[in-house]
Amino acid sequence: MTHWHTLFRNVHLATMAGAGYGEIRTPLPARTGGIVPALTRYRVLERFGNSTLLAVEIETGRHHQIRR
């Protein structure tokens, strides 16, 4: 059996000052009220002086998670 979630991932690119690798586990507001868990993983692809190119994986797919 093929598990599609292991074959295809949404990986976003981002730049920021500094940074290494890690996870962000911060609850986000739900559209219907309350809060929901959210998980974002990031890792360094390349460093350019004061900037860092990151690969960012949105694990939980929450609404507007990539902007928070």
Image (cartoon, rainbow, N blue to C red):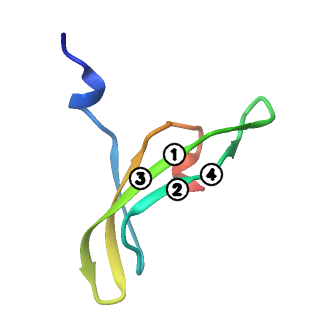
Spatial CA distance of label 4 from label 2 is 6 Å
| Tag 2 and tag 3, C-beta contact below 8 Å | yes
| Tag 3 and tag 1, C-beta contact below 8 Å | yes
Q: Amino acid at mark 1?
A: Leu
Q: Position of residue 35 (x, y in %)?
A: 74, 39
Query: Of helix, strand and loop, which one carries label 4?
Result: loop
Q: Which residue is mark 2?
A: 24
**On the rendered image, what quadrant is the C terminus found in?**
bottom right
| Tag 4 and tag 2, C-beta contact below 8 Å | yes
In this view, the residue in front, 37 or 14, is 37
Q: Amino acid at mark 2?
A: Ile
Q: Residue at x 67, y 45 (%)?
A: 28
Looking at the image, residue 37 sits to the left or right of residue 51; the answer is right
Q: Amino acid at mark 4?
A: Thr
Q: Which residue is mark 3?
A: 41
Q: Position of residue 22 (x, y in %)?
A: 42, 61
Q: Which residue is mark 4?
A: 26
Query: Considering only order in the chain, which callout, 2 or 1, is on the residue closer to the N terminus?
Result: 2
Within 10 Å of disc 4 (Cα), the crowding (few <14, some 14-19, many 20+) is: some
Query: Of helix, strand and loop, which one carries label 3?
Result: strand
Within 10 Å of disc 3 (Cα), the crowding (few <14, some 14-19, many 20+) is: some
Spatial CA distance of label 2 from label 3 is 6 Å
Q: Which residue is mark 1?
A: 39
Q: Residue 43: name its quadrant.
A: bottom left
Q: Residue at x 57, y 38 (%)?
A: 62
